[in-house]
Image (cartoon, helix red, strand yellow):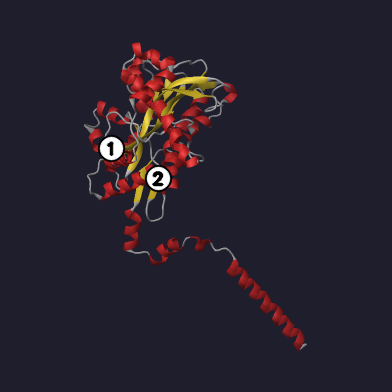
Amino acid sequence: MRRLVGLAIFVIAMTFGMVARAEQDEYDPAKVSDSLKAIFQFGSAATKQALNENTVTCITGTIGGTYVQFGADLASVLDDGNNLRVLPIVGRGSVQSVADILFLQGVDIGVVRADTLDYLEKKGFAKDIKRQFTYVTKLYNEEMQIIASKSIRSLRDLEGKTVSVDLPNGSTFVTVLTVAERLGMKANWVYIEQRVAMEKLKKGEVDAVIVVGGKPYKSVSSFTNDGGRFHLVKVDYERPLQGDYLPATLTSKDYPNLIADGETVDTIAVPALLAAYNWAPKTDRYRKLSLFVDAFFTKFPQFQRPPFHPKWKEVSLSAPLPGWTRFPPAQEWLDKHGIEPLTRERFETFLRQNPAAAAMQSSTDKEVLFRQFQAWEASQNAKAQARPAQQ
């Protein structure tokens, strides 16, 4: 009997020993980041200072938009422990982002649309606002996308119609109203959040929904085209638009739900840029922006490969932005690495490769032609800058 009791005790002890060893050998997620564990156990005022010292916050846009995806990409590539952290913030669109960069405590940079500041000044909402801003780089071109029934063939067909242009703190309405004003076109503009507006479109409560954002734009690509009733409407590149906008094309690959296979739809586009408040040199905010620029420009080729947003392939770090002042450390980085802006020789190459653009010389001034060249140059630089990382 004693031997049986002893054997039972031995078995129980072995069992508990094996369980204990299994628990010791089991993967412990807490061990993944000892520095993170230290923050919670030993965090102090010094910890708070260290965390904030090299964190750059970036105001982006609404969920599902291109801005917010760019912010996520920046954080994914540039976060480097305590050396640099990029903290994206979900925003409300370009107009709100301009206000946030100017007034919201802790916002360092943001994605805004190039025509937003001009609109604010023209309407008398701000004065000399561009002097308060600087830009790191021009990003990509944002296309105008108009969803409507197939009875509406072009932008001008929206005359007198009820058209949703998103909420008034975004930037779609800025571009749409600016374009309409230049064309002398009037419609019943309504300000409805995109997802709600698209449901109203299906019910016939609005005649069209306009989205201005980098293609493929999620709310457009996910639009359920009931029975093929809807399509994307053409926007002609008319002369009144050629000073500030670029010609662009939407394809069936961009939106198979709205464009028939192999077909294209002409539209216009407006540049987006990475902007910041014009901080004085030697300030801490200026230092953090300099740190961000060095990391961003150095690692830039990584953004132009999957899985990051395809719009990164349009970005040319050296592309100038008329009317804007570049952040000095950004220009210094470009100069140091020999990345020059557009040249006359490449402009001539663009003309030779684009007969339609060359034919426009007689009816279009050089500035318009040069802006088209900038779009072409962006795609060329994207390919060239991506090659070293692939070798």
Instruction: Please tell me the numbered disc located at residue 11.
Output: none
Q: Which residue is most to the bottom? A: 2
Q: Nearer the viewer, residue 247 or 234?
A: 247
Mark nearest the camera among 1 and 2 is 1
Q: Secondary structure at mark 1?
A: strand
How packed mark 2 is, by other alpha carbons closer than 10 Å (few <14, some 14-19, many 20 or more), is: many
Could you tell me how far apart the alpha carbons at marks 1 and 2 are, in whole angstroms? 19 Å
The answer to whether residue 119 of the structure is visible from this angle is yes
Q: Is residue 22 left or right of residue 194?
A: right
- Residue 140, compared with residue 244, is above or below; it is below
- Residue 384, compared with residue 24, is above or below; it is above
Query: What amino acid is labelled 1 in the image?
Result: Thr
- Residue 12, compared with residue 1, is above or below; it is above
Q: Nearer the viewer, residue 288 or 302?
A: 302
The x, y position of residue 240, in whole percent, is: 33, 16
Q: Earlier in the sequence, mark 1 or mark 2?
A: 2
Q: Quadrant of the N terminus?
A: bottom right
The x, y position of residue 42, in whole percent, is: 39, 66
Q: Residue at x 40, y 38 (%)?
A: 61
The x, y position of residue 259, in whole percent, is: 54, 22
Q: Residue at x 39, y 29 (%)?
A: 172
Q: Residue at x 39, y 48 (%)?
A: 87
How packed mark 1 is, by other alpha carbons closer than 10 Å (few <14, some 14-19, many 20 or more), is: some
Query: What amino acid is labelled 2 in the image?
Result: Pro
The residue pinned by badge 1 equals 134
The residue pinned by badge 2 equals 88
